Image (cartoon, rainbow, N blue to C red):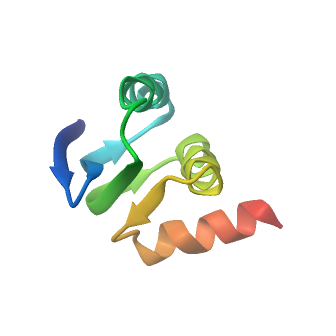
Amino acid sequence: MTLKIERSVQQGSTVFALSGRLEAEHIEDLRRLFELQNGSPAVVLDLRELRLADRATVKFLAGCEAGGVRLKNCPAYIREWMRKEKD
């Protein structure tokens, strides 16, 4: 299983819908996509179809959220893991 990223614009926000497996090797690709959205008022990561994440990506997602990226449909296990990483 690999990672699939679909980009759309919804209500003035750039939404990246992630599906599949999010692993450390994908972080740089996501950072580049965020940089390309420089003029967009908001970036949203829709995690509804995310099936698996590793520790590096959970830390990355926590950093994204702290930096203003909205995490939509974040699975409970990832939300809990992010909370534990902060502690």
Q: Quadrant of residue 5?
A: top left
Judged from this view, the residue extending furthest toward the right is 87
Q: Is residue 87 above or below residue 63?
A: below
Instruction: Answer yes or no: is residue 6 visible.
Output: yes
**In this image, 43 relative to 50: left or right?**
right
* Residue depicted at x 18% and y 48%: 9
Q: Is residue 5 above or below residue 13?
A: above
Q: Is residue 63 above or below residue 25?
A: below
Estimate the x, y position of residue 38 in percent, counting from the top left.
Answer: 43, 29
Estimate the x, y position of residue 55 in percent, counting from the top left.
Answer: 60, 48
Q: Quadrant of residue 35?
A: top left
How many marks can you see? 0
Estimate the x, y position of residue 72 in percent, counting from the top left.
Answer: 36, 67
* Residue depicted at x 51% and y 47%: 54
Estimate the x, y position of residue 84 in percent, counting from the top left.
Answer: 72, 69
**In this image, 56 relative to 78: left or right?**
right
Along the line of sight, which residue is nearer the eye, 71 or 55?
71
Quadrant housing the C terminus: bottom right
Q: Quadrant of residue 37?
A: top left
Quadrant housing the N terminus: top left
* Residue depicted at x 73% and y 60%: 85
Instruction: Answer yes or no: is residue 1 visible.
Output: no
**In this image, 67 relative to 42: left or right?**
right
